[in-house]
Image (cartoon, helix red, strand yellow):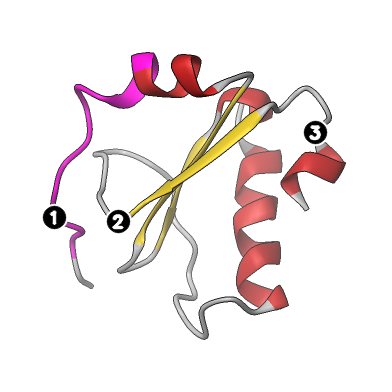
Amino acid sequence: MIYAAHPPVGAIVHVHAWMEGVPSTQIQYPCGTRELAQAVSDLVAASPEPTRAVVGLRNHGLTITGPNLADILDRTEDRILPRVPMS
C-alpha cells in the first residue's frame, strides 16, 4: 500500500523497537491483516513527509519509509529504543 501510494519511497524498514514521539496505530492485531496495513498506510500518508515517515504499530514496532535504506538508517539509528512500550 505504501509503495503504491508513494512511488518515491524506495525502502521500507520494519523493526521491533520504538522511537519517542512517533504517531501510532490504534489497533495492534491481527498482524498481517489488511486492516492493520491500512492503518499504517494512513499514518504514513498523514505524516508531513510520507516518503520519509516513521510510524508505530501499537505494542509492536515501527515502520519507516525512505528513498533508500541508507537514508532510513542515517535518520533513525541513534533514536531507536530497543523496547516497545506496551499500552
Q: Which residue is mark 1?
A: 83
Residue shown at 66% from the left, 25% from the top: 51
Residue shown at 77% from the left, 41% from the top: 3
Residue 76 x/y as whole percent: 32, 25
Q: Amino acid at mark 2?
A: His
Residue shown at 38% from the left, 66% from the top: 58
- Using a 10 Å C-alpha cutoff, classify the residue at mark 3 as few (fewer than 14 neighbours), some (14 to 19) or many (20 or more): some
**Of callouts 3 and 2, the N-terminal one:** 3
Q: Which residue is mark 2?
A: 16
Residue 57 lies, with reference to residue 65, above or below; the image says: below
Residue 27 x/y as whole percent: 49, 75
Q: Amino acid at mark 1?
A: Arg
C-alpha distance separating marks 3 and 2: 23 Å
The boundaries of the magenta stretch are 74-85
Residue 42 x/y as whole percent: 69, 53
Closer to us: 36 or 48: 36
